[in-house]
Amino acid sequence: MTLKIGIAGTGWFGKMHAEKLSAMEGVQISAFCGTSSEKAEAAASPYRDARGYESIEQMLDDRKLDAVYVCTPPFAHGEIELALVERGIPFLVEKPIGVDEDTPNRIRNAINEKGLVTSVGYHFRYMDSTSRAKDLLAVRKPLMALGQWMGSMPGVYWWRHMNTSGGQFVEQTTHIVDLMRYLLGDVNEVYAAYGYMNKAEQDEDVTVPNIGSVTMKLASGAVATISNTCGIQGGHHAGLQIYTDAGVLDIAGDALIDKEVSKTTKYQSSSNPYIRENEAFLHAIRTGDRSGILSTYDDAWHTHQVTMAANKSAMTGLPVKLRK
């Protein structure tokens, strides 16, 4: 069975997924849609018989698709996903799933009502190092965690505005929040502090904070703090350190370092998490077996809830308790 795939979005993620999918047996890239037909046609041009469209409705009306990959900027979520749900077309959507709570919640409710197969691009869950950490945590008690996403500010225009990206904690650091949730469980309460250092050196229209730290109380009783900055030029780092009763698990990049009392062991990932993510999603479409999908839309909504709570807390200066 050859699966015909459409891609919504003509940026890096859309093209990356198309490239990986086209190399898989039984998969055909059939269509791209973008903000203009020119961009969509250019993205579709490397793939035989693929076509470009300037709207999701045009693409779905003209092509019979088995699934769609939604790879749009954060502010563009909503119309595309709801159109796919209405037509019963499974989709994989890249994180974050929005810049507010209401739109993703509407999508989530529509998906659950229809029972649609979905996946969200939290690819850290598919790393070998993450799988090993999960195994180790089954026999160790996590006490607290420290996470980081430290880097510079991306150059794309939409990333620099709160209303189009949601800010760094929503757009980038969500990966670390999701990794923490996957390994340690859900969050009950969030307190955040954001800041604007060296603001005079930035473009005047930048509205995202460039430093922040978020402390969370977990349902398990553990405590976690995740910090980020988009204001440095060097020393980029992203990772999560989990402090347990038997030592420290340090997940960074594609490796896990297990620091026990008497020894240190390094586990290196060998498989590509994007490929594993795609394989699990496509297997679910073909067979109905969803067990390999590690991040459904419903699960990703809870990660999104945490990042939205962080933004609210930073704005109000008050802790935010999460709704069950």
Image (tube, rainbow, N blue to C red):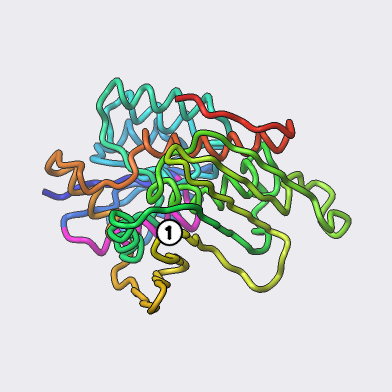
Amino acid type at circle 1 is: Thr
Residue 104 in the image: above or below residue 10: above
Q: Tell me the element at label 1.
A: strand
Residue 49 image point, x, y percent: 28, 53
Occupied quadrant, residue 295: top left
Residue 102 in the image: above or below residue 19: above
Between 267 and 209, the residue placed more toward the observer is: 267
Residue 180 in the image: above or below residue 257: above
Between 303 and 144, the residue placed more toward the observer is: 144
Residue 159 image point, x, y percent: 64, 49
Residue 98 in the image: above or below residue 242: above
Residue bounds of the magenta highlight:
9-25
Report if residue 5 lies within the magenta region.
no
Report if residue 24 lies within the magenta region.
yes
Q: Residue at x 45, y 55 (%)?
A: 13
Q: Quadrant of the C terminus?
A: top left
Occupied quadrant, residue 6: top left
Q: Is residue 45 visible?
A: yes
Tell whether 323 sits left or right of 195: left
Occupied quadrant, residue 85: top left
Q: Residue at x 40, y 32 (%)?
A: 81
Q: Residue at x 76, y 44 (%)?
A: 207
Residue 8 image point, x, y percent: 42, 43
Q: Which residue is mark 1?
A: 244
Q: Residue at x 24, y 37 (%)?
A: 64
Q: Is residue 97 visible?
A: no
Between 134 and 275, the residue placed more toward the observer is: 134
Residue 179 image point, x, y percent: 43, 52
Magenta stretch: helix, strand or loop mostly = helix
Give the total number of marks visible in the rendering: 1
Between 286 and 255, the residue placed more toward the observer is: 255
